[in-house]
Amino acid sequence: MIQFMKIENGRTAPIIRCDVCSKRIEDAGLALAMWKTKEGKLLEDGKVHFCHKACHEKLDEADPVVWSSSELTDYLRRLVHNTKVRIAEDVGAKLLDELV
């Protein structure tokens, strides 16, 4: 799930939490965005579940439907693209560093 939380320096920042173990996903390369499908159709109105790659089997066991997935890094890139967010390399890196 996506939520806000207080981080180390006392600021509030958006984070992604694993829907299986509830721990913060700190490395998008080690996580998945998953959604349910059946016969090529989206279930749950396309609701996205986030989980660590190490936790995804537990998600499968908890609800044995057909799960589609994307690496979280790819999912986030597509989300940024599809919402027309434009971040210049130099400005974006500085902004993101301040928010972390």
Image: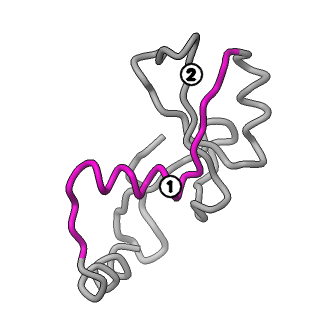
Q: Amino acid at mark 1?
A: Asp
Which residues fall within the magenta stretch?
65-87
In the rendered image, the vertical position of residue 89 relative to residue 19, given as above or below:
below
Answer with left or right where residue 22 lies relative to residue 4.
right
Q: Which residue is mark 2?
A: 36
User: Which quadrant, please, contains the C terminus?
Assistant: bottom left
Location of residue 25 by image quarter? bottom right
Image quarter of residue 30: bottom right
Cα distance in 3D space between marks 1 and 2: 18 Å
Residue 77 placed where, x, y %?
41, 58
Q: Residue at x 28, y 79 (%)?
A: 92
Classed neighbour count for the residue bearing mark 2: other residues with Cα under 10 Å, few (<14), some (14–19), many (≥20):
many
- Residue assigned mark 1: 74
The image position of residue 71, as x and y in percent, is 59, 51
First in sequence, mark 1 or 2: give its number: 2
Q: Secondary structure at mark 1?
A: helix
Q: Residue type at mark 2?
A: Lys
